[in-house]
């Protein structure tokens, strides 16, 4: 028996791991936007914040017909927080080395990806003060 997933909505989840300390990044604001077609305007759908496990479990549902999704991670507040400053003090290099700024080198991270109907997309963010990586998880 074949199941047609084209009528089912797509869904998105994410989590953040701070690779500089090997722990989840708690309290990072994440917003979700979507569009229908590559030339369409982005529509903000809402957002959430990462929990103690670094996960956003309550991102809004995607509207029918969504073809592209954008996740915006507000990382500056996380990097400037007292909790993370203590972690940075344990590192070999100062937090603002070579950045030329007094804030976070990456104050935000925007990830855009294509989606198909009926699929679930888990998109983790691996984050550190001077770099980040993303991938399609499961």
Image (cartoon, rainbow, N blue to C red):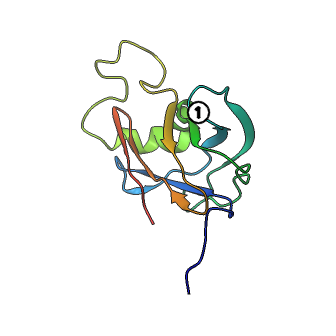
User: Quick one: which residue is furthest to the left in this view?
Assistant: 92
Place of residue 35 in the rendered image (x, y in percent of width and height, measured from the top left)? 65, 36
Residue sitting at x 36%, y 12%: 100
Place of residue 70 in the rendered image (x, y in percent of width and height, measured from the top left)? 57, 38
Q: Quadrant of the N terminus?
A: bottom right
Place of residue 30 in the rendered image (x, y in percent of width and height, measured from the top left)? 63, 42
* Residue at disc 1, secondary structure: helix
In which quarter of the view is residue 58 placed?
A: bottom right
Q: Answer with left or right where residue 64 lies relative to residue 4.
A: right
Q: Which residue is mark 1?
A: 77
Q: Nearer the viewer, residue 118 or 70?
A: 118
User: Quick one: which residue is furthest to the bottom in this view?
Assistant: 1
Q: Where 87 falls versus 75 (above or below)?
A: below
Residue sitting at x 28%, y 18%: 98
Residue sitting at x 30%, y 41%: 91
Q: Answer with left or right where residue 41 lies relative to residue 39.
A: right
Q: Nearer the viewer, residue 5 or 85?
A: 5
Q: Quadrant of the C terminus?
A: bottom left
Q: Nearer the viewer, residue 63 or 26?
A: 63
């Amino acid at each position: 028996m074949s199941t047609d997933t084209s009528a089912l909505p797509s869904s998105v989840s994410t989590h953040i791991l701070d690779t500089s300390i090997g722990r989840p990044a708690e309290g990072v604001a994440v917003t979700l936007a979507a569009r229908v077609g590559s030339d369409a305007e982005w529509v903000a759908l809402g957002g959430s914040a990462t929990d103690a496990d670094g996960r956003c479990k309550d991102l809004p549902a995607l509207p029918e017909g969504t073809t592209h999704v954008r996740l915006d991670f507000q990382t500056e507040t996380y990097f400037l927080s007292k909790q993370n400053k203590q972690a940075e003090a344990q590192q070999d290099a100062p937090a603002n080395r070579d950045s030329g700024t007094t804030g976070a080198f990456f104050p935000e991270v925007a990830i855009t990806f294509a989606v198909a109907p009926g699929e679930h997309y888990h998109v983790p963010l691996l984050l550190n003060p001077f770099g980040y990586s993303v991938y399609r998880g499961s």
